[in-house]
Image (cartoon, rainbow, N blue to C red):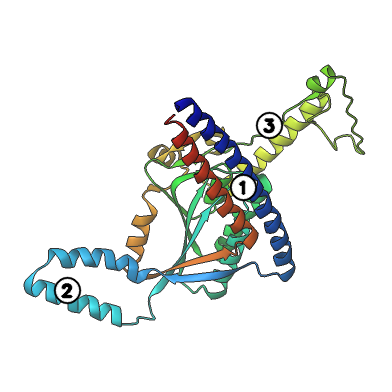
């Protein structure tokens, strides 16, 4: 009996997989069509501005109230109520930007718009805090991201970079632009180096008697290739190009952090927290929460976010993918019973 049930359940699993695959394919096609239509309509996203001042104050105020009693509690309530109702236009502002970077640095478009918006309203003594998290990625993408932050510094805006988790490679290229870098105790910082990896399938093609032809104009139009036979001359040129990018990286970091011993840290290594402080890569230990709570004492904390509109097709694909994943997980868990 158990064998019959197991066979039936296995057949059902195959049927479920086929059905889910068909559903996903249909959703994917619909999503592609909808996305194409949306691209023609335009409309990329919108800017969101949130005043975090009251929220940051309320948590500590609530705790103080819960610990107080009697007249002291009533006095605190009056004080907090008065502070909330007052509108002090003389307070300076701290603009907060969050950048969580991916390998291709696609988030740079949102950063560009956020920086542009801030520069349009920045006043004397206003500051900017960037909560940065990125392990790095493509050179041109993170080069542009660092250039966006440099727009703030070039205008004389005090720029603080907060690293709670990681700012390595391209992430550190961005971080070094700040006048001050604050890192959490176990934040990963550094990796001032360049990496390039290219697979080569020439031996596989040769073994199977498959010819590969590549025609270029210019001696170094292609140095290393995926399918062709690589040469020592090509490898040497590719290495030279990588070294050139590394030299640019080191020069950029040194220009923005003049006191840094660049040759000692531009080895591709990473350091954590206090080690990074000792190396001069960051200025002090702390979290973004510490910085915000300190700032809210005498500044209005304003978060600026440019949110890309998620296309309907992307939403459908994501929902379909989630549904398939859950269905397969349930089927797998139930099948283990037999």
Q: Which of 57 and 245 is in front in this view?
A: 57
Residue at (62%, 62%) from the top-left corner?
Answer: 312
Which residue extends farthest top? Answer: 207
Q: Which is nearer the N-term, disc 2 or disc 1?
A: 2
Instruction: Name the N-terminal-most of marks 2 and 3.
Output: 2
Which residue is disc 1 drawn over? 252
Q: In this view, does 35 lie above or below 118?
A: above
Image check: 263 left or right of 197? Answer: left
Q: Quadrant of the C terminus?
A: top left
Expressed as whole percent of the image width and height from the top left, the position of residue 327 reads 51, 44
Which of the 4 image quarters holds residue 70? bottom left
Q: Which residue is drawn at 73% across and 30% down?
A: 239
- Secondary structure at badge 1 equals helix
Residues at marks 2 and 1 touching, judged by CB atoms closer than 8 Å: no
Asked if residue 92 lies left or right of residue 268, the reply is left
Q: Residue 197 carries which label?
A: 3
Whether residue 126 is situated above or below residue 229 in the rendered picture: below
Quarter of image, res 81: bottom left
Label number found at residue 76: 2
Q: Is residue 172 left or right of residue 79?
A: right
């Amino acid at each position: 009996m158990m064998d019959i049930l197991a066979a039936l359940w296995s057949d059902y699993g195959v049927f479920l997989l086929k059905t889910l695959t068909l559903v996903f394919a249909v959703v994917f096609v619909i999503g592609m069509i909808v996305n194409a239509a949306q691209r023609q309509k335009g409309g990329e996203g919108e800017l969101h501005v949130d005043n975090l001042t009251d929220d940051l104050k309320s948590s500590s105020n609530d705790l103080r109230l819960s610990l107080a009693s009697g007249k002291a509690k009533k006095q605190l309530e009056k004080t907090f109520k008065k502070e909330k109702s007052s509108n002090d236009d003389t307070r300076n502002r701290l603009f907060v930007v969050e950048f969580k970077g991916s390998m291709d640095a696609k988030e740079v478009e949102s950063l560009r718009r956020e920086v542009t918006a801030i520069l349009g309203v920045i006043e004397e003594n206003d500051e900017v805090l960037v909560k940065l998290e990125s392990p790095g990625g493509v050179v041109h993408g993170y080069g542009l991201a660092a250039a966006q932050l440099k727009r703030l510094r070039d205008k004389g805006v005090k720029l603080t970079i907060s690293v709670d988790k990681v700012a390595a490679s391209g992430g550190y290229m961005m971080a070094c632009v700040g006048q001050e870098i604050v890192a959490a105790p176990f934040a990963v910082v550094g990796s001032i180096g360049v990496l390039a990896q290219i697979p080569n399938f020439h031996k596989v093609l040769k073994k199977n008697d498959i010819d590969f032809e590549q025609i270029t104009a210019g001696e170094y139009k292609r140095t290393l290739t995926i399918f062709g036979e690589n040469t020592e001359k090509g490898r040497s040129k590719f290495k030279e190009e990588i070294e050139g990018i590394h030299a640019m990286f080191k020069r950029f970091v040194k220009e923005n952090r003049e006191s840094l011993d660049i040759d000692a840290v531009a080895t591709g290594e990473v350091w954590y927290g206090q080690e990074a402080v000792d190396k001069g890569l960051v200025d002090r230990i702390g979290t973004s929460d510490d910085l915000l709570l300190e700032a809210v004492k005498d500044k209005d904390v304003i978060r600026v976010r440019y949110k890309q509109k998620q296309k309907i097709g992307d939403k459908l694909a994501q929902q379909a993918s989630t549904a398939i994943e859950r269905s397969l997980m349930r089927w797998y868990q139930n099948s283990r019973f037999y």
